Amino acid sequence: MPAKDANGNPVATEGKDYYCDANKVGGNWCPEFDIMEANTYAWHSTAHKCDAPNDKGHYENCDRGGSCFQIAWDQDSSAYGPGKRIDTTKPFHAKVEFDQVDHFTTTLSQNGQTFTMNSDCGSYYPGIRDDLEAGMTIAISNWGDEFSTMSWLDQDTGCSGDCSNSPNLTISNVEVKTGSSPPPPPPGPKYDYGSVCKTRFDDDCNDCDCFWSWPHNDPAKWNSKDAHCRCKASEDFFDFIQ
């Protein structure tokens, strides 16, 4: 990104955000690396290379299906999901490392537990390596609810129909680094909790363990303008590190 026409001029594309990818969503092609295509039960990481662009940086064709798949369910069905080694109902780290030769590695970690995914990428990776080194735009989106559009992801776990649950999702603490370094410590709590609210349905609560709460970093604490009743369990969030 930004998407470019044949003369190298930026193109706003259908969403007016200059988006492009390897499936021509929005109207323009460009290399795509899916760091995290995931839900509570399934995780995919996939590279999508393109044919060489013209001298203005315009792409005419890309590999829509991708390769070098890292699929959590295939690599270890006991590793990722609710109540598993990486419990997706609680905060966890995701770290994706790209080398300069022939592969990438995805490592998920949580409370001392780790799950590392690798893939055979030696013949494919060089086709996207230069794009990664040149600098690719990070795009974060939340999309897809019908099985007809999400079966490629949902079928990992045997799902054969639409999902009706609506889990909370927060992606935070995104970092891009060169060289090697250990992952940062898990983030602190988002909210502090006080006394139990009068009912399980007060304010933001919906038949849950409902507590008076306020932002962790707000010095006003229980007198904060953002203080009200929240579900204590609902404040779980994802911590993503690239």
Image (cartoon, helix red, strand yellow):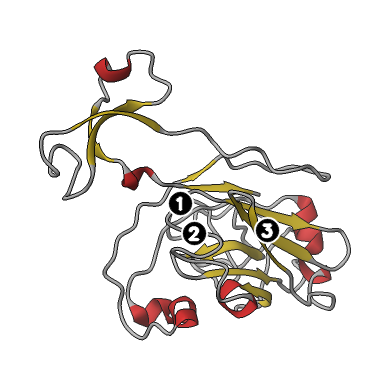
* Numbered disc in front, either 2 or 3: 2
Callout 1 amino acid: Lys
Upstream in sequence: badge 1 or badge 3: 1
Depth check: give the residue in front, 83 or 214. 83
Tell whether label 2 touches label 1 (CB within 8 Å): yes
- The residue that disc 1 covers is 90
Q: Identify the residue at horizontal 17%, vertical 49% (top origin).
A: 206
Q: Looking at the picture, which amino acid does disc 3 mark? A: Thr
**Does the residue at mark 2 contact the one at mark 3 (Cβ under 8 Å)?**
no
Determine the residue located farthest toward the right in the rendered image.
Answer: 101
Judged from the image, the secondary structure of the residue bearing numbered disc 3 is strand
Kind of residue at disc 2: Asp
Q: Is residue 23 visible?
A: yes
Whether residue 1 can be seen here? no
Residue 194 vertical position relative to residue 66 in the rendered view, above or below: above
Where residue 116 sits, quadrant-wise, is bottom right
Q: Say whether residue 141 is left or right of residue 135.
A: left
Q: Which residue: 53% across, 65% down?
A: 37
**For residue 87, which numbered disc appears in the image?**
2
